Image (tube, rainbow, N blue to C red):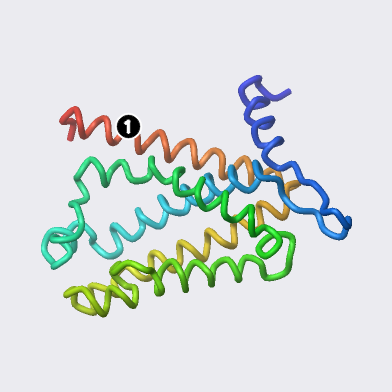
Amino acid sequence: MLPLASCHALDWFSFAVEHHATDDGARVLPTFRAVVLKTIVTYTVTYFVFGVLALFAFDYARLFAETDLRFLMRPITDPMVMAGPLLQPIRGLLFGALLFMLRETFFATQWGWLRLWLVLVVFGIFGSPGPAPGSLEGMIYTKLPLWVQLTGLPEVVLQTLVFSRLLCYWVDHPERRWVSWCLGVVFAVEYALTALGLLASRAGIH
């Protein structure tokens, strides 16, 4: 028999995977709770994992301190940067609410994950309205060298790809309880480690 805490966790994901049928009964679509909760967890997990990988792979500590990015980006030791993963559920909530309104385009349909990824890449990365590094506007209006602009692209392109594929798979297959368990555990561990690291840095523990 599962421990009581494990049962509560299972119940939490159970109501997060409720589905309802469309009016014509032709398709089964996810509920608002399913889309929002799964978007929050999936986005936060992929953001953290790819952020850590890119931190070491592309030496962000040096880039943010020694290149022109120092005029734009906070150092990685800044409390706001360290707290970044803790704030991603806010973005996940916004994404989830929008994805729910567009659920017929992205969920319970073939290649929905690819459509979602292309939307994120085109509108969120390359076509960003603001002059973000790596975007078309950033390349036109900022003074950052091209190599600096391109350095962060692998992280965001791969993160959005995995996010799109994983989210659509999770939403479209609510019966795969192992996905709920795995992502739920990773989310909890990542959140706890980030919070402990931030508290340790604020307390001056090195």
Q: Viewer-proximal residue, 154 or 144?
A: 144
Give the position of the C terminus as an image quadrant: top left
The image quadrant that residue 61 belongs to is bottom left
Q: Pinpoint residue 55: horizontal percent, then vertical percent.
A: 29, 57
Query: Relative to residue 7, is residue 124 depicted above or below?
Result: below
Q: Amino acid at mark 1?
A: Leu
Q: Which residue is mark 1?
A: 196
Mark 1 neighbour density, 10 Å: few (under 14) some (14–19) many (20 or more): few
In-image side of 15 versus 99 (left or right): right
Furthest residue toward top = 4
Q: Quadrant of residue 66?
A: bottom left
User: Viewer-proximal residue, 36 or 6?
Assistant: 36
Q: Percent from the top left, x then y, of residue 183?
A: 56, 45
Residue 106: x, y in percent?
66, 63
Q: Residue at x 40, y 65 (%)?
A: 156
Report whether 185 appears left or right of 78.
Answer: right
| Quadrant in the rendering for residue 23 | bottom right
Q: Residue at x 38, y 40 (%)?
A: 86
